[in-house]
Image (cartoon, helix red, strand yellow):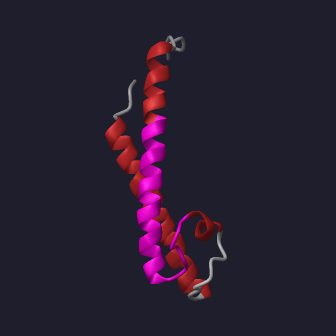
């Protein structure tokens, strides 16, 4: 079975982007706003902070990060799936 590379990459990008955004709003709701970069994401994604604008910046970074990761994963999966024989039959 082969993966559709574009669809898988887009799905990974959206899931990761919305995940970063949901994490940011979770922190805003329960711990308040924070302009300092006290999270690991703040050190990885330039411009990200625990603010409403930071959630949009985090979504953009997360979307492109997930897109690239999903693209590489699906491409590699397809390459390996066509080379390895299917040995398990149910």
Determine which quarter of the picture holds residue 27: bottom right
Q: Is residue 22 magenta?
A: no
User: What residue lies at 67% left-to-right and 76% top-to-bottom?
Assistant: 38
Name the residue at 35% across, 49% down: 10
Q: Residue furthest front?
A: 46
> Residue 76, position in %: x, y?
48, 29
Residue at 43% over, 80% down: 53
Give the position of the N terminus as an image quadrant: top left
Question: In terms of secondary structure, what is the magenta stretch mainly?
Answer: helix
Q: Position of residue 88 (x, y in %)?
A: 54, 14
Q: Exactly how many numbered labels are in the figure? A: 0
| Residue 24, x across and y down, in percent | 52, 75
Query: Eyeballing the image, is 68 above or below 36?
Result: above
Looking at the image, which residue sits at the far bottom? 32
Examine the image and state in which quarter residue 8 appears: top left
Residue 32 or 64: which is nearer the viewer?
Answer: 64
Residue 23: where, in percent of width, then height?
54, 71
Task: Give the vertical position of 34 relative to 63 (above or below).
Answer: below
Query: In this picture, which residue range is highlighted in magenta?
Result: 45-73
Q: For the point 36% across and 36% down, which residue is it?
A: 5
Using the image, determine if residue 8 lies above or below residue 76.
below
Find out whether residue 70 is within the magenta segment.
Answer: yes
């Amino acid at each position: 079975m082969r993966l559709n590379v574009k669809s898988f990459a887009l799905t990974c990008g959206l899931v990761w982007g919305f995940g970063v955004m949901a994490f940011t709003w979770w922190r805003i709701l329960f711990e308040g706003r924070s302009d300092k970069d006290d999270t690991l994401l703040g050190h990885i994604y330039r411009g990200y902070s625990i603010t409403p604008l930071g959630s949009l910046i985090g979504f953009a970074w997360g979307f492109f990060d997930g897109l690239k990761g999903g693209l590489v994963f699906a491409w590699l999966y397809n390459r390996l799936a066509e080379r390895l024989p299917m040995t398990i039959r149910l």
